[in-house]
Amino acid sequence: MDVLAFVCLLRSVTEFILLGFSLGHQGNILLSMVFLPMYITSLAGNLLIFCIVLGNSHLHTPMYFFLWNFSILDIMFTSVISPQLLWNLLSGDQSISFSACIAQLYFYFFLGTVQFFLLTSMSYDRYAAICKPLHYHSVMSGEVCTKIVLACWVCGFFSVLCPIVQISRLSFCGSNTINHFFCDTGPLLELSCADTHFIELMDFMLSSLVILGSAILTFISYACIISTIVLIPTTTSRAKAFNTCATHLTMISISCGISIFMYVTPSQKETLDAHKVPAVLTTVVCPFVNPFLFTLKNDSVKEALRKTAQKISDMMMGSILATSKGKTFVLGGSL
């Protein structure tokens, strides 16, 4: 056993320190006052979409089935990072155990990969609806949609398993301070005293395959969609078709752009500080914005939301009236 390996055994890391944003206590408190409402709004908004789609039978279509799954994914994805981030900002305790760090790393990439697969599936659904309308219900049947979503989750689960296992077996014998606000691949590889070239190459290949592959397939779908839309004779129909696809195209463009900058690079150890702002966008801001994009840009969801609110209002009014009649009856009987 060489000297370096012996030192690694003596100084095995049991926890890491998340450096975060290095803004001081007051700066962290101010930042938490921004992130906490965004996290709560993200949970509430995605949960609202989940309930609306589940509770309205006219939304039980392939497009809203994918949207329903995407809302679940958004809730899980932001919950992998935000609670730990908020705790570190508010408490000042920036430590995270080794096992919790590896778990956070795994679920971050697992759910992020599923997100790209799901966005690609949603683009195919829009392609089938606009370019193949006569065959749409047979091509995107309930069974097919279920299999597609299940494949997204299963492929995401196994695709990131190997590199995360390899990272968990690395020797960390130097500093245990992670230059990030969560456990990411680059900062962890930076701390390792082992040779990480193979893991970096594997990460680069997987990231390129998932991110660039999703982007290429999505933009091919939208190239076909746009070529079909421009042939639609009426302006109203063209505008409706573009409006249906605009939200999804905006989401995947932002996600792909940020992820390519962060992960499609031969070495993720470089420019770690530059990754913090894009990481905030993907882990905090995007899950916060997504429910607004889906509800404010989608007439069907807005109509379902209006009907749901009306039902709740009618139920509350009926309950109040029933209570008032009961009190009146009791008072009348006592007189």
Image: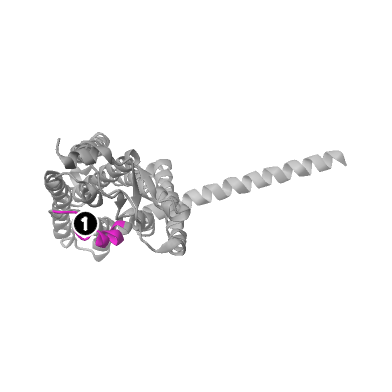
How are the residues colored?
Answer: one colour
Is 304 displayed left or right of 315 in the figure? left
Secondary structure under the numbered disc 1 in the rendered image: helix
At label 1, the amino acid type is Met
Return the x and y of residue 132 as percentages of the image width and height: 17, 48
Return the x and y of residue 63 as percentages of the image width and height: 29, 47
Using the image as rendered, state which of residue 308 and residue 3 is in the foreground.
Answer: 3
Is 167 displayed left or right of 314 in the figure? left
* Quarter of the rendering occupied by the C terminus: top right
Return the x and y of residue 24 as percentages of the image width and height: 42, 63
Residue 97 shows up from this direction:
yes
Q: Quadrant of residue 103?
A: top left
Q: Residue at x 58, y 45 (%)?
A: 315
Q: For the magenta stretch, what is the residue range?
A: 267-279
Residue that numbered label 1 is attached to:
262
Q: Quadrant of residue 21?
A: bottom left
* Quarter of the rendering occupied by the N terminus: top left
Residue furthest to the right:
335
Q: Residue at x 15, y 61 (%)?
A: 231
Residue 303 shows up from this direction:
no
Q: In the picture shown, does residue 45 fall above or below 157?
A: below
